[in-house]
């Protein structure tokens, strides 16, 4: 195995220990490996999209006043068929979108959402 040193915020370190405890993992390294495998699987799903893709995109964003998601939605308005926006506690928002479109456009939207790094949660459920 390769040893990698990383820096985490206090919140991320606490989340890592919580993941370790909840899943009964032997150590933080095992929790990190699990998280990497989950992200790798999600990346493979995004990269493997082809043809016309339909599904549901669920996002919890950190700050209601930050317009980053509105800019992405405007850019991909042809792929977003239905949208639900709901305010959550601590100025967070839930976005649920039914999307349909060419795989490259859907993949582009998902990559952009992930790369900005301002969402607490992002998942795409392909129909």
Image: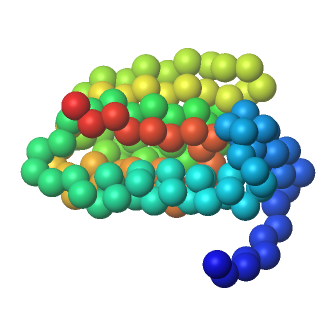
Q: Which residue appears farthest toward the left when viewing the image? A: 51
Residue 13 is at least partly visible in this image: yes
Q: Is residue 96 above or below residue 12?
A: above
Residue extending farthest to the bottom is: 2
Q: Quadrant of the C terminus?
A: top left
| In front of the other: 70 or 40 | 40
- Residue 9: x percent and y percent? 85, 56
Q: Is residue 111 left or right of residue 117?
A: left
Residue situated in front as seen by the camera: 40 or 104: 40
In the rendered view, does 94 fall on the left or right side of 41? Answer: right
Residue 61 against residue 75 in the figure, above or below: above
The image position of residue 87, as x and y in percent, is: 62, 19
Q: Can you give x and y, in whole percent of width and height, for residue 27 in the image?
A: 78, 54
Quarter of the figure with residue 89: top right
The residue depicted at 39 percent of the width and 34 percent of the height is 57
Q: Residue at x 68, y 52 (%)?
A: 31
Q: Nearer the viewer, residue 66 or 13?
A: 13
Q: Position of residue 4 (x, y in %)?
A: 73, 77
Q: Residue at x 51, y 35 (%)?
A: 59
* Colour approach in the figure: rainbow
Q: Which residue: 56% across, 59% down?
A: 36
Q: Is residue 73 above or below residue 58?
A: below
Quarter holding the N terminus is bottom right
**How many numbered marks appear?**
0
In depth, the one of 17 and 94 nearer the eye is 17
Is residue 63 visible in the rendered image? The answer is: no
Direction from residue 8 to residue 56 in the image, left or right: left
Residue that sits furthest to the right in the current view: 10
């Amino acid at each position: 195995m390769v040893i990698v040193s990383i820096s985490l915020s206090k919140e991320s370190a606490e989340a890592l220990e919580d993941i370790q405890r909840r899943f009964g993992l032997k150590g933080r390294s095992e929790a990190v490996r699990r998280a990497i495998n989950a992200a790798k699987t999600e990346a493979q799903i995004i990269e493997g999209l082809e043809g016309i893709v339909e599904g549901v995109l669920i996002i919890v964003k950190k700050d209601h006043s930050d317009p980053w998601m509105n800019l992405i939605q405007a850019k991909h308005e042809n792929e977003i068929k239905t949208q639900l926006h709901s305010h959550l506690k601590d100025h967070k928002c839930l976005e649920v979108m039914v999307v349909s479109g060419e795989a490259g456009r859907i993949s582009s939207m998902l990559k952009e959402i992930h790369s900005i790094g301002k969402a607490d949660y992002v998942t795409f459920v392909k129909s």
